[in-house]
Image: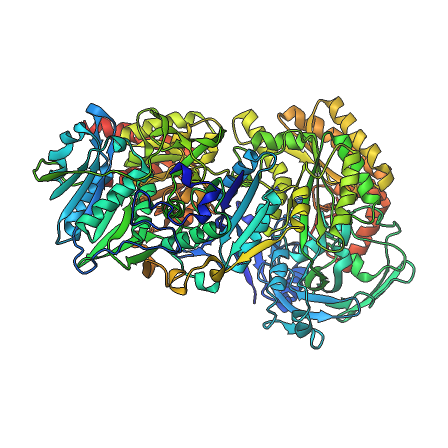
């Protein structure tokens, strides 16, 4: 038996942060992995499509059902165990556990209710001198770990810690036909491009797609395939089309006190030049580098007085034309490290006097709020122009390029947008060559023009060796980019793998590879 | 000139949530420098000119040091933490007495004693005036503007219905009336500067007060009990689909009082 | 006193004692020891507003006089500062139940000077030895009361929202910050002092009476050089006086809704107030702002339209008798706080109220 209920047309289960709305019949809420398997067996036998959903914080419609039922993993939540292997400590978590919950448990340092995955791990972790944390910061801390793994989420801290993929140790995956595999990194590795593994009473052996996944840049476009790959990497980033993550082990890292910093520069150019130097420097060692351009700061200045969430963000200094936000661990010779920051900033019109610095949680949060308020500020701005709440108000890019191409990409953005007469702001993960360009849509005409420009950006990013979907994933709304990156053939090959694992094509239809016509 | 600024560390009320009973949940709430005090401090830092010194002091538990470090980062020159287990449970009188004793011992020569209007965690802003009385100096409440004037200062005070401009002799107590909710953040330079500075700790003996003059024992008021307010909100929640129904609800409530 | 504020003060052992022999520097503090066994009665500071012909008693002073009688079996004393014009208030003051009124007619103290007022009231307290001293929690009262308490070395409870008597003892009730907790506080010695929020006690019935008026002579206390003073007249009314407040917040995105709100306020006999964001937008004057950085209000009904209810705002309305919230965001903190929460669009409800009230009003008249 499992919980199954008809869903209304305005149900939360039919949408996510992309605001895309789908269609679905029922929501099924399994309480554990065995119920989940039963759900899959039943639906598979009926050939009834199911879409997996958890916290619905995705921005590409990955959990939005097109038809059939929704499996909500909302009751499969919690940190359940702690272990340690050669690489270090890891936590065992259920799929719908949020990132903030994982960090809360780790911060509390009370592990008495958790189980030991390896002997004595709990005890050891609680007696470590420093607390631990899950280092991938996908910005949205209330997203689920299962969702993060399914789209290989990344965020500002990817600059230092890499994407989610690098932190996944083990997965328990329920396959569309109801079998499950419970495996650790290293258990099943492809020989060349052929991968084989048992699952329940079945045994799978097939050729993986022939394309190589781009790992040179930040990339969240589909599953990873390359020679001698690990099976884990096929599921990470697969957006649920191959199987449902029912449990996972993710590594955690020691936490050090951080100092947040914002350096202000006179112009965008100054800031970007400084970024290049920071990236090449070993001493400063920032956790991430986040950029806010002139337009972003102007936007903040404009809406700051009316946005209640910005109530605690200090007023921006008058001369600030762009800003660079970065965290540093409070370790090593801080004076020397900051002396280097001063040198670099000084060469580009900045200084340590034109800066903000925060140590405690509250101040750091205030600085974070400044950075995260930009998308909301766009909303406020468009609302103030239109005198009403806008539906569509912006279009944001999510593209990364290799180091050497970032300048070209940045000027391409500006050139194209200016030519199209569109207003825009740029901000984001400049350390990973992955700034977000948010195009401000003041009218429907803007929207049409923005769509064209956007497609050109995606093509340019791919051409420069980058990814058109660096961190948000593909979901249902960016499936064109899969084709753009891997060609019709690549997509067809992924589809073939899916047909082997999910012969009736019931799981998460529409994600990554679109719907077969 | 020397300006002594009294500050307080307070729980960050913005981070506080309300439980089902409507009580504030204090556990795990970070502590911050009281925004009113931060405002007063930044005003004094703006006024500081070459050769002037801004001294900050607070009475509180050892962790209140963080608030002082923040003050140093913002630009204060010296910081004192008045801390002693015996200070716990002090009411306004005992607090003011300890602060006054500290002032007379450590900063008797300050040109102004500066306070924020009130603390956001429930203090009602009486401490400055009790200190002023004990020091035997003039007090300038709700100060909006403070400027130098020859040997002293001129303050503009806002009493709500009147604004008055007064001459402020040196040694007076000034309490700023406003707050900047946006607050300020230190610069990296400030952060580095503060790293090389120390917060001086001062205990009960150092300010020369007896055990029965401080803390709970030295207090003149006693909390008999706390309870949920009898006027606690009823907290009835209604989802409204038809505005007319909602308006009806409110109009009915209003008729009850008219 | 001005010569006693410089660097010489640390070595000066007689600071402040030149004009008052009872005042010694702290550390050598000798507080006045009121005769604890005989202290009785209540002293109320009668605050006045306006000048000359327009002079009137502050509402909160009247409320306190009305309550004082019920709080004590002893006598009710009043102290009032000012010149000849105060005499016009005598009948009303006595009518509110004052047995003995002390009228301070020092030229220096005709205008409010916290230092002089405090020292003068202290001298009076030493004479009449009241068990309780009550002062309204107005901007002046909040500043004056601690000065008096400190000079007397007694306890003070600020911003009380309730007083109950137990013989000579008074239990003072005041809200704990922001939440719905209240604390009951006792003062450990006489006189017990409290500042009391306006509106805590009902306004007593106005009638004239007679009693004893004494001119209280006082010299000394610190003088203060007031260079000039201006009365701030802000669009007439004060939101702190309103019994009903229609308060607007960030959820009001259409400026024309302010006019609708004004219209509603007119019809129900209230005023329009707002949260910080509308002031910063320039839509409303600062004098209408409620909250930590604005005004503290205590109306009968406070209706928050589109106000999220950050603690800063709630701090300004904790004295409201009833709070109604209208906000379309079901997670807005105000919904945890209000007596009645409507999850609905603020603009829709406002417009509808405006319409409905038009109907009901014409029906009544």
Residue C355 visible at all = no
Residue B145 horizontal side relative to residue C97, left or right: right
Q: How many marks?
A: 0
Compared across the picture, whether A266 is left or right of C94 comes to right
Q: Tell me where residue C132 appears, x and y as whole percent.
A: 22, 51
Measuring 67% from the left and 50% from the top, which residue is drawn there?
A: B196
Q: Could you tell me residue A374's position as x and y percent?
A: 63, 37
- Looking at the picture, how far across and down is residue A50, in whole percent? 65, 55
- Residue situated furthest right in the rendering: A192
Q: Is residue B63 above or below residue A268?
A: below
Taking B33 as reference, is A193 left or right?
right
Note whether B144 is above or below B233 in the view shown: above
Quadrant (top left, top right, bottom left, bottom right) of the N terminus of chain A: bottom right
Q: Is residue B19 left or right of residue A86?
A: left
Position of residue A266 measured from the top left corner of the image (x, y, whole percent): 72, 30
Please name the residue shown 46% across and 42% down the image: B116
* Closer to us: B138 or B45: B138
Is residue A33 at all visible to an observer of this figure?
yes
Q: Is residue A465 above or below residue B209?
A: above
Along the line of sight, which residue is nearer the eye, A26 or A262? Answer: A262
Residue A254 in which image quadrant:
bottom right
């Amino acid at each position: 038996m499992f919980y199954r209920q008809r869903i209304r047309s305005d149900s939360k289960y039919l949408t996510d942060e992309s605001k895309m709305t789908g269609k679905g019949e029922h929501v099924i809420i399994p309480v554990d992995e065995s119920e989940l398997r039963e759900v899959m067996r039943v639906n598979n036998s009926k050939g009834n499509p199911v879409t997996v959903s958890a916290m619905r914080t995705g921005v590409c419609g990955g959990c939005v059902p097109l038809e059939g039922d929704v499996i909500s993993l909302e009751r499969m939540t919690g940190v359940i165990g702690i272990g340690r292997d050669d690489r270090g400590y890891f936590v065992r978590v259920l799929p719908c556990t949020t990132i903030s919950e994982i960090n809360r448990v780790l911060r509390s340092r009370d592990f008495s209710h958790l189980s030991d995955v390896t002997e004595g791990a709990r005890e050891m972790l609680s007696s470590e001198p420093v607390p631990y944390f899950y280092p991938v910061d996908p910005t949205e801390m209330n997203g689920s770990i299962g969702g993060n793994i399914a789209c290989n989420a990344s965020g500002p801290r990817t600059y230092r810690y890499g994407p989610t993929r690098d932190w996944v140790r083990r997965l328990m995956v329920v396959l569309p036909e109801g079998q499950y595999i419970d495996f650790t990194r290293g258990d099943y590795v492809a020989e060349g491009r052929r991968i084989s593994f048992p699952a329940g009473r079945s045994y799978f052996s097939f050729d993986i797609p022939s394309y190589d996944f781009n790992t040179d840049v930040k990339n969240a476009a589909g599953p990873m395939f390359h020679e001698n790959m690990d099976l884990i990497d096929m599921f990470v980033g697969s957006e649920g089309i191959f199987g449902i993550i029912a449990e996972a082990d993710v590594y955690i890292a020691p936490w050090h006190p951080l100092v947040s910093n914002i350096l202000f520069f006179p112009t965008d150019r100054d800031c970007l030049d400084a970024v290049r130097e920071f990236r090449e420097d070993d001493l400063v060692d920032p956790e991430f580098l986040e950029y806010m351009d002139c337009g972003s700061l102007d936007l903040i200045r404009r809406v700051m007085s009316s946005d209640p969430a910005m109530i605690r963000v200090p007023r921006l200094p008058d001369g600030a034309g762009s800003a660079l936000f970065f965290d540093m661990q409070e370790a090593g010779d801080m004076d020397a490290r900051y002396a280097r920051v001063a040198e670099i900033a000084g060469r580009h019109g900045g200084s340590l006097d034109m800066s903000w610095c925060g140590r405690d949680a509250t101040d750091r949060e205030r600085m974070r709020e400044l950075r995260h308020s930009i998308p909301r500020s766009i909303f406020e701005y468009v609302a103030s122009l239109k005198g009403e709440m806008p539906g569509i108000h912006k279009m944001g890019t999510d593209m990364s390029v290799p180091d050497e191409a970032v300048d070209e990409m940045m000027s391409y953005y500006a050139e194209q947008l200016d030519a199209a007469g569109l207003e825009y702001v740029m901000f984001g993960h400049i350390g990973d060559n992955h700034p977000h360009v948010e195009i401000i849509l003041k009218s429907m005409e803007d929207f049409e023009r923005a769509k064209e420009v956007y497609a050109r950006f995606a093509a340019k990013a791919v051409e420069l060796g980058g990814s058109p979907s660096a961190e948000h994933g593909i979901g249902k709304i960016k499936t064109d980019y899969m084709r753009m990156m891997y060609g019709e053939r690549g997509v067809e090959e992924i589809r073939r793998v899916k047909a082997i694992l999910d012969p009736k094509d019931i799981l998460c239809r529409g994600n990554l590879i679109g719907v077969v016509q | 000139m020397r300006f002594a600024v009294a500050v307080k560390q307070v729980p960050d009320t913005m981070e506080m949530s309300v439980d089902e009973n409507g009580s504030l949940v204090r556990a795990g709430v970070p502590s911050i420098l009281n925004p009113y005090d931060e405002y007063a401090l930044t005003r004094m830092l703006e006024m500081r000119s070459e050769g002037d010194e801004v001294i900050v002091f607070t009475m509180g538990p050892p962790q209140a040091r963080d608030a002082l470090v923040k003050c140093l980062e913002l630009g204060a020159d010296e910081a004192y933490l008045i801390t002693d287990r015996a200070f716990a449970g002090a009411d306004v009188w005992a607090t003011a007495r300890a602060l006054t004793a500290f002032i007379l011992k450590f900063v008797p020569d300050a040109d102004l004693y500066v306070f924020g209007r009130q603390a956001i965690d429930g203090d009602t802003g009486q401490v400055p005036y009790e200190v002023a009385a004990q020091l035997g100096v003039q007090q300038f409440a709700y100060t909006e503007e403070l400027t130098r004037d020859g040997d002293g200062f001129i303050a503009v005070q806002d009493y709500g219905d009147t604004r008055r401009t007064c001459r402020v002799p040196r040694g007076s107590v000034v309490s700023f009336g406003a707050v900047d909710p946006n607050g300020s953040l230190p610069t990296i330079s400030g952060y580095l500067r503060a790293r090389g500075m120390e917060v001086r700790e001062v205990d009960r003996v150092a300010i020369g007060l007896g055990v029965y003059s401080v803390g709970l024992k030295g207090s003149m008021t006693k909390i008999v009990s706390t309870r949920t307010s009898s006027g606690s909100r009823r907290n009835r929640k209604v989802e409204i689909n038809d505005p007319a129904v909602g308006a009806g609800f409110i109009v009915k409530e209003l008729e009850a009082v008219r | 006193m001005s010569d006693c504020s410089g660097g010489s003060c640390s070595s000066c052992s007689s600071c402040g004692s030149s004009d008052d022999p009872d005042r010694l520097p702290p550390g050598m503090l000798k507080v006045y020891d009121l005769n604890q066994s005989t202290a009785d009665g209540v002293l109320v500071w009668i605050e006045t507003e306006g000048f000359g012909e327009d002079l009137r008693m502050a509402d909160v002073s009247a409320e306190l006089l009305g309550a004082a009688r019920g709080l004590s079996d002893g006598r009710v004393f009043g102290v009032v500062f000012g010149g000849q014009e105060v005499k016009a208030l005598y009948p009303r003051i006595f009518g509110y139940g004052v047995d003995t009124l002390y009228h301070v007619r020092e030229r220096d103290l005709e205008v409010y000077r916290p230092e002089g007022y405090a020292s003068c009231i202290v001298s009076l307290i030493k004479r009449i030895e009241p068990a309780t001293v009550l002062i309204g929690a107005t901007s002046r009262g909040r500043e004056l009361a601690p000065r008096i308490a400190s000079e007397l070395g007694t306890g003070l409870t600020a911003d009380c929202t309730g007083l109950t008597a137990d013989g000579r003892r008074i239990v003072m009730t005041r809200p704990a910050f922001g939440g719905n907790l209240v604390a009951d506080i006792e003062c450990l010695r006489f006189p017990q002092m409290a500042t009391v929020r306006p509106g805590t006690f009902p306004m007593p019935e106005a009638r004239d009476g007679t009693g004893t008026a004494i001119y209280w002579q006082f010299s000394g206390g610190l003088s203060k050089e007031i260079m000039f003073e201006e009365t701030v007249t802000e669009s007439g009314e004060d939101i702190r006086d309103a019994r009903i407040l229609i308060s607007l917040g960030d959820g009001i995105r259409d400026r024309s809704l302010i006019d609708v709100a004004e219209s509603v306020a007119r019809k129900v006999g209230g005023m329009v107030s707002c949260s910080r964001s509308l002031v910063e937008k320039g839509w409303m004057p600062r004098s209408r702002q409620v909250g930590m950085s604005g005004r503290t209000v205590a109306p009968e009904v406070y209706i928050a339209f589109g106000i999220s209810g950050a603690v800063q705002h709630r701090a300004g309305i904790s004295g409201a008798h009833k709070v109604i919230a209208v906000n379309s965001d079901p997670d807005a903190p105000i919904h945890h706080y209000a007596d009645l929460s409507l999850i609905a669009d603020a603009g829709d409800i406002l417009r509808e109220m405006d319409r409905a009230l038009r109907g009901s009003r014409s029906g009544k008249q």
